[in-house]
Image (cartoon, rainbow, N blue to C red):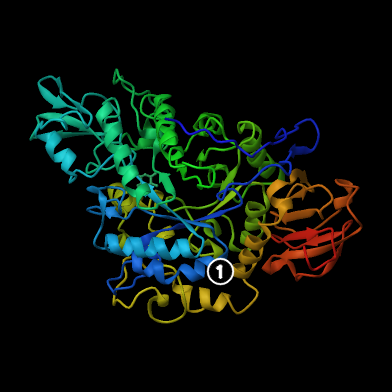
Amino acid sequence: MLNVFLCLGLFVSHYTVNTEIIYQGFNSSFVPQWWQPCIIYEVYVRSFKDSNGDGLGDLNGITEKVDYLKNLGVCAVWLSPVFKSPQLDFGYDISNFREIDPIYGTTHDFDRMLEKFHKAGIKVLLDFVPNHTSNMHDWFKKSVKKIDPYTDYFIWKDAKYVDGVRSPPNNWLSVFSGSAWEWSEGRQQYYFHQFLVEQPDLNYRNPKVHEEIKDVMRFWLDRGLDGFRIDAICHVYEKEDFADEPLSGKPGVLPTDYLYLDHPYTMQLPENVGLVKEWDELIYSYKKKESDELKILVLECYAPTKKLMPYYSNDSTCRSTFPFNFNLVEHMDRESDAQDLKTMISTWLINMPEGSWANWVISNHDRDRIASRMESTLLDGIHMIQMMLPGTAITYYGDELGMENSYVRWDQVTDTFALNYGPERFQLVNRDPERSPFPWDDTKNAGFSDASNVWLPIHPNFWADNMKQQSKRKSHLRTYKQLARLRQNPTLIYGDLDMFTLSKWTFGFTRSYKDNPTYVVVVNFGSETETVDLLKFRPTLPAILKVKVSSLNSGLVTGNLVNATSIFLRPKAGLVLITSYSNEV
Ligand code: BGC
């Protein structure tokens, strides 16, 4: 039976587009859920901390670093997949959903880690991969042999014969290149795989698969897990008539590249949303009494903003399923100006269902690191934007230090996606550079591992730029921590948002709430020094503002006073200013 609770979340309408206030915050009767003011921190487990000297990060390594994460100010961690797996896609190829892979530890290690996080007040989310399994999963092995009930757990189709030659049933392509169909000698049929050959897709047209997957979710939630990051949700269903997909006409791509086709029949089918609603019910059923905290589901799908909105829980004020907002990952680049920033941000806020909560992603394990995609000097400014906007912030491990991509040569490549592209083209898709080990200090292997070899090259600058060293001086890490602390302030939870293009390259916004001091964020995305006049845009602001947080390159420090009519910003510099001179705020 469905649990019904009173949602203490009365809110006022979210945005007013015809004035400059783009987003009206919440009133004081709104009771934020734990995940709302939160920073969710992605731990790429292989690269975080190795506790047993095999060159790979593991669960006990993460447990050692709980205090670091607590001190950083994160309220939840999301771990990349730790289930049993042949590791061909580093855990996104799961051969047993209920076991921890021995390279990462044991179930006991997991429980110990969970307990330590919970004691520190940090929630834990696991990466969950419902679209496919590994071909080493027992379900698949039995499906090949047509052993019931597994016969139709995967997507099987007969071959097509063209002039007597066996060929795949249609032209569908794998994201990781080549046909999305693989012949099974055992079953004498093709099976469908959106990703690697070794990652067969589950068949969600089979109700038994729904039940299996929900059982697995219950298994971990019953152990005390706080939720899941759901992988590749927009790939889960395919069109039932298996029609060929149209050519994209994109220049410069090979017929084997995923981008060679458009994907109307294999991505973003409406049925995906229905599946998520089943899981939303499941996690909500864990809230048995008013005081129980909600579990959450965070969904990974790269799609236009409007297509993602149906994934939000129906009652967004008291439910907790939401899609990642990748607008800053997909659209922010070195060409972005202030107006572009404003558009990227307002697109999400304006389209979000009434009463919903936003989120902001800037990097992850599949995309270049933010400091490499943009410029490391702009990192503090970008964190200021991400952390001071209304919504949950999602941080990829090491971004708090401004970690950059590591260069990975062809002979060092481990990412199967890149290996599929070969030595000439691997750089186009290689995801190894953003996955290199965390630089804890300047000792051997940056303090990540005692092994003689670690699984990916560590950034060669680790001896000069690492966590330990950044803890001692004004640094990206310090800026990040300052911002993380500010997020608990009611103005940043409840407040309105008003955005400005202060000049072509200088983007700014205010957050204000009732009579509380207003926060002002200004960031210069350009290559020239700018002097901006804030009062032109918000004449009600006081003439003098106080620096609350300053970027490394700003030339200012916390506590400095600035004249609101002439704020001086070096290229790529950012400031968080406040309208109060008190040290309390
Ligand atoms: C994950 C990738 C993974 C793929 C297949 C993605 O979207 O983030 O790292 O390779 O799903 O599971």
Furthest toward the bottom, the residue is 443
Q: Is residue 345 above or below residue 467?
A: above
Residue that protrudes farthest toward the front in the picture: 289
Residue occupied by mark 1 = 71
The residue nearer to you, when weighing 219 against 574, is 219
Does the image show residue 251? no
What's the residue at 82%, 70% (across, down)?
560
So how many labels did they put on this image? 1
Q: Residue at x 62, y 31 (%)?
A: 351
535 horizontally vs 360: left or right? right
- Ligand 1 has an atom within 8 Å of the beta carbon of the residue at disc 1: no
Q: Position of residue 513 (x, y in %)?
A: 78, 48
- Please name the amino acid that badge 1 sits on: Asn
Q: Position of residue 370 (x, y in %)?
A: 54, 56
At label 1, counting other C-alpha atoms closer than 10 Å, the crowd grade (few under 14, some 14-19, many 20 or more) is: few
The quarter of the displayed image where residue 10 is located: top right
Q: How far across and down, in percent of the image, does residue 283 sit?
A: 43, 40
> Is 18 placed above or below 67 here?
above
Quick check: 323 left or right of 48? right
Is label 1 in a helix, a strand or a loop?
helix
In the rendered structure, the answer to whether residue 324 lies left or right of residue 558 reads left
Q: Quadrant of the N terminus?
A: top left
For residue 243, say whether it is visible: yes
Looking at the rendered image, the quarter that the C terminus falls into is: bottom right
The quadrant holding residue 400 is bottom right
Rendered location of residue 489, percent (x, y): 70, 56
Q: Is residue 53 left or right of residue 118?
A: left
